[in-house]
Amino acid sequence: MDSTRVTEHPTSHERRQPSAARPTAPADPRGALLRTPEPPAQGSPGLPAQGRPDDTPGSPGAVGMPVPDGQKPVGAPVTADAQAAAPGAPAGSGPEHSQPSATEPAGEPDPHRPRPESLGGTSGAEAAVQLGGKDRRTGQSPAPGAPMPMRRDGDRLRFVGAATRRIARGIDLDEIVMGLCRATVPTFSDAILVYLRDPLPVGDERPTGPVVLRLRRTDRIPEDRDTEGFLLPALQPEPDVGITAELCTVRPGGALNEVLRGVRPVFADAPAARAALPELIGDDLSVPGGQRAILAPLRGRRRVIGAALFLRRPDRPAFETDDLLVAAQLATHSALGIDKAVLYGREAYIADELQRTMLPETLPRPTGVRLASRYLPAAETARVGGDWYDAIPLPGSRVALVVGDVMGHSMTSAAIMGQLRTTAQTLAGLDLPPQEVLHHLDEQAQRLGTDRMATCLYAVYDPVAHRITIANAGHPPPVLLHLGGRAEVLRVPPGAPIGVGGVDFEAVELDAPAGATLLLYTDGLVESRLRDVWTGIEQLRERIAATAQLTGPDHPPPLEALCDEVLDMLGPGDRDDDIALLAARFDGIAPSDVALWHLDPEDAAPGRARRLARKALSRWDLEELTDSVELLVSEVVTNAVRYASRPVTLRLLRTDVLRCEVGDDVPQLPRLRQARATDEGGRGLYLVNKLARRWGATRLSAGKVVWFELNHS
């Protein structure tokens, strides 16, 4: 092999090679910032041997000088075996660390590599050997907690690599900014100020108005001694202490605007930076003189989104030219990370809003039942899914309880869930039986796509009859907790999932005694990698029964506390899916609080309705409502018998309010309108709207129900 074609590998243990194998200087001018001209070979004619700036003839370790026996020359290469055998050497020290070890001298660069310039000092160990523990430039001992200066280009590269890895670990805005601060202080700078645009632009947005920078975060080395009143001692970990201008408006054509447009970091003593810094930090504050401050614009993918100011104390070595490259790398990685974090934050916000709008904002308060719910996403990074729950009031004081689960954890699953939930609400408004609702949901899922699969459980609770009708489409069965503390898994036909097509659904009617609690849930609560569905259902049943024992046989556990106890059964690795939980406490309506009559559609029906209502109110000690109830009942019954062909139903319910329901076989719903002075009718609903607490009309499969409510003491 030709010796002139030997490739140099960047390893920490390199052998000496002939001078012909030395690499040539890089052609790229940027390489001059990373590498300085290499020293000539020792003994070359016409060129003196190069030593360090402080190497003097006769000093140990100087080039060409002998070293006393038993003493290792300063800067001599340290082999791996010697490093491992060095007493007190820290574990894990090596190329991954950005600074030389404090317990052993830093190795001298290989003679075949270009020799870099010093980066503001030597390592602590070398300084201790040469000057008795003092800095060889200043002659002073380093301050406690002061940064260890980087001596070689390899130190810079290792520092930039470690810093960018720390910055890249952040997933949101605060984590990335904190990563930049923690990575640079104290290794690279003594303090840092990070300014970001307010508000931060997202993606391709084109902000309007002036550019405003807000101080997002500061960090510094704790300082106990006075440093002549510069900005550095006043820095605090939080930006809201008034140490500098928190908001800065970038003037078009101003000095700060020109620096930000230039993108490249500049020293604070540069003419452009001297004019830009007062605009950024305020006129009353100053920064250390010399090259002890670097102003680095933060540029994202499309625009400048902020600036970072790196500071060193006046008693510390100043920045060097190569440090501008380090600051540029830190600013670039931070800006790109911030740009992506803003995009991720926008996507997470959209996902949260989508999920929130597709789930009930608040649960209704139907008569005879109390409700509580919980929803947990599968993970913080996947906040949308196909799980949903709903509670829909129905005519006759009934309520529909729905829980479903669409396959997947994506935006598509959430969109399909929203469509199925809207369809279920529409079908519930038609007062269809549960099995018919599931049948229409199955048809809707097939229209959305061939692979749109979902499970659903639809139940209708009647507080007057104390009965519940349930139909299931491949969903886990509900659990019923009785008042005495016994919990049972209801035997409901499982059925096929929604979207299969061509499958019949079956409904069952079960008792729903007063004081019992029904729990509807999705499979994320009972199924995981550690257990199957039926094992999880049995654990859920046992957990509910154990919780009920704590409150006694005559007092059911509070709904909110019960939901929390159910979720506490999940271990750290048990949650692999979204969880939707709906709990319903059946209070029911006692038969003594219900009055029901059937009225023939004749002219005498309104008078009879008034007499029946008066007797019921007298029996319930609600005589103060007699006048209002008689007037409103007369108006609603008169409108019903005018068009009905079958008997009209009149029902009064006494709960926390007095509810009156009038049903007939005419599907057309009445509408509120303003009657003219010459009209003979049209004022009945106007009176109902003025006197009733609430009122409404609901279409049934065989007619409609008009209802109103009145408050009572």
Image (cartoon, rainbow, N blue to C red):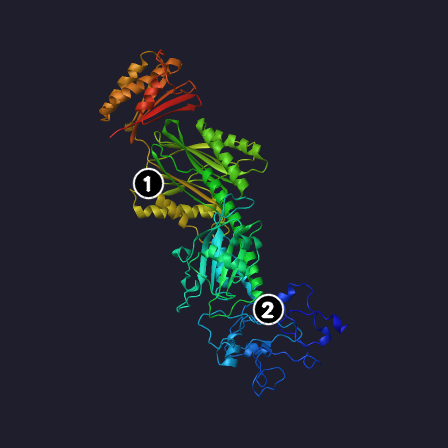
Please determine whether, in this image, residue 180 is positioned above or below residue 367: below
* Closer-to-camera residue (59/511): 59
Q: Position of residue 688 (x, y in %)?
A: 33, 22
- The amino acid pointed to by label 1 is Leu
CB of mark 2 within 8 Å of CB of mark 1?
Answer: no
Q: Going by the image, does 279 lie left or right of 19? A: left
- Give residue 170's position: percent from left, percent from top: 51, 56
Q: 230 or 667: which is nearer to us? A: 230
* Image position of 16 (left or right of 157): right
Say the numbered circle drawn on residue 483: 1
Cα separation between marks 2 and 1: 73 Å
At a point 39% along the width and 15% down the height, the residue shown is 646
Identify whether 289 is placed above or below 512. below
Task: Mark 2 or mark 1: name the one nearer the start of the chain.
Answer: 2
Is 680 displayed left or right of 169 in the figure?
A: left
Which quarter of the figure is the C terminus placed in?
A: top left
Q: Amino acid at mark 2?
A: Gly
Which is more toward the observer, 212 or 432?
212
Q: Residue at x 34, y 32 (%)?
A: 367
Q: Secondary structure at mark 2?
A: helix
Residue visible at 27% across and 22% down in the picture: 628
Please tell me which residue lies in front, 206 or 90: 206
Residue named by callout 2: 154
- Crowding at label 1, few (<14), some or many (≥20) Cα neighbours within 10 Å? some
Instruction: Kindly tell me whether residue 8 is visible in this rendering.
Output: yes
